[in-house]
Amino acid sequence: MIKRISVILVMLSSLTTVAFAQPEACETTRWYCVEGLNDGLDAPGDIIAQDTPRAAIESLLFFAERDAWGYAAHLLDLSNIPEEEQALRGAELARALDTVISRKAVIDWDLVRDRPDGIDAQASSDQAMAGEPRKSLLLWTLDLGARPAAIRLARVKPDGGEPVWVFSRQTVDNIPALFQRYGPNGFEAYLPAALTEKTALGFMWWEIIGLPILMVLALLVGRWVWITLNWVSGRVERRVIKDIVRSVRGPAATGAATGLALLIGSSVFVFSGQISTFLTPVAWLGLLASGLWFIINAVEVVLDRLTQFDDVDLTNQQDVHMRTTATRVAAARRAFVVVVILVGGGVFLSQTNIFQNLGLTLLGTAGALTLVLGFAARRVLGNIMASLQIALNQSARIGDRIVYNDYLCHVERINFTYVQLRDWDGTRLVVPVEEFVSTAFENWTMKEPEMLRIIKVKCAHEADVGLLRDAFMGILDELDQDQLGDRDSAKVRVAGQDVFGKDVWFALPCSDPNTSWDVACDARERLLAAGTRIAEDRDVVIFPDANAAEAA
């Protein structure tokens, strides 16, 4: 029995010894575990600080200022390079990486934390990595043509060593291609050494000189394209070709200027990151805007050729279909412009990696900027939606005769942000669309063109309305019958009275609301003259005898 117990104790002791002899498990959530890190490099001693992400970048900049590329090589993960080549190639890759970062990257030091675990202690709780240790940090993203290339820091822990921050092996693998694309080009090789020196702002002297020259050159090219197309349009005989050439002047000039800036800024003048961060998005945005502008103008020219309304008086009664068509075409144009802008903006944001970088530096205030822009543009957006509302519900069509705020006018244009009304005397009334749709107005041609115009006349109490009724019916025979509506609708009614006399309303049927006002004025003039003749011929009272003071 004692022998068995001894055997069991020996076995337990052996298992305990094996368990304690096993190496400690690697915490893969906090760092990347590797067997060795840069074993082909000489031991750097304590001169390199890379225990935090910020210390690693500061060390790279420190060694770059002193051309100590052998020490800078320790800041790269050279695991994919044979050990016998790490010393030589590591120094070359460190030099190339510093050149790429200084030229094309803008490091946001607020995001590069100075603590070993890389935790962003100021991050809000709704962020995915809030309060979590980081083992990889994205510093910048650069375009390599077919794909984007990220510049990342990784926290690596070799066996038996302390975890350190180095540039990731994927970043190291991309350094040669990045240097070839964004490093010094042939243009800089011919520049004097004085122009390649950096100024206090961090830019080289040739950048400070070359950027204004590039902007002036782009403006001159855009101006030349505009003048050339303007000259061509003046010598074209066919109207449609002339309109097309004139419509593409603006887009072509804008596209040529921004395209030239993008081409030279990416191939001839390889500007530093502080400049290209803004120059490249602006150039791409200019190219996109010119393309969208060209599409919109082309559609406008086509629609103008398909719907010729300039030589047609849309206020005529028989042009009801044309009024509806003109309104729908105007609505289609506005809807098309909105869709093109939204689609183009979406393509710009989704197909470029520009805002991935801007998100590290500028778009942190995107929420506040969106609120400011939304507040500033709320009236414009409201007017655009209101103009589409008018086109959809047909409450006012182009050419309709309306009474708006006591103005007798017709709708001449329905634009994005305002409605253009033409008063009966030829003056134009410009009303914001949002205000137009929120104000009650009379539309005389909305449903049926026929209408009754009421002529109100103040008569004496003893006036014989029958005589006036007969005179009114005779006046109807004298008026233009094409401008009159259903004669059975003509009425004469005593609608009220006061101390001065009685109110007699004469209902005049009109067939066209666009001419009804003129017809009513003519009928009123004839009616007053007929009343005066009746009073003189029959020696009766028709109109009340009251002076101005009594009437007031």
Image (cartoon, rainbow, N blue to C red):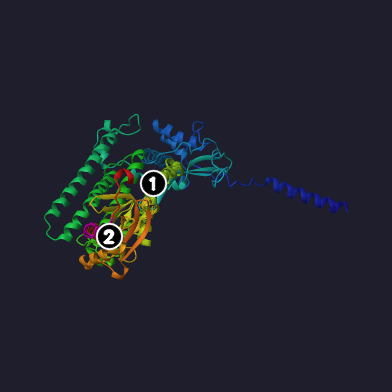
Horizontal and vertical percent position of residue 74: 47, 38
Residue 377, which numbered label? 1
Q: Residue at x 26, y 48 (%)?
A: 259
Nearer to me, 249 or 17: 249
Left or right, 360 with reference to 116: left
The amino acid type of the residue labelled 1 equals Ala
Q: Is residue 468 visible?
A: yes
Horizontal and vertical percent position of residue 518: 23, 58
Left or right, 392 with reference to 311: right
Q: Is residue 47 located in the magenta-colored stretch of the structure? A: no
The amino acid type of the residue labelled 2 equals Gly
| Name of the residue lying farthest toward the top | 200
Quick one: label 2, few (<14), some, or many (20+) residues within 10 Å?
Answer: many
Magenta highlight range: 531-542
Q: Secondary structure at mark 1?
A: loop
Quadrant where the C terminus is found in the figure: top left
Report how far apart the C-alphas of labels 1 and 2 lie in the structure: 29 Å
Quadrant where the N terminus is found in the figure: bottom right
Q: Quadrant of residue 235?
A: bottom left
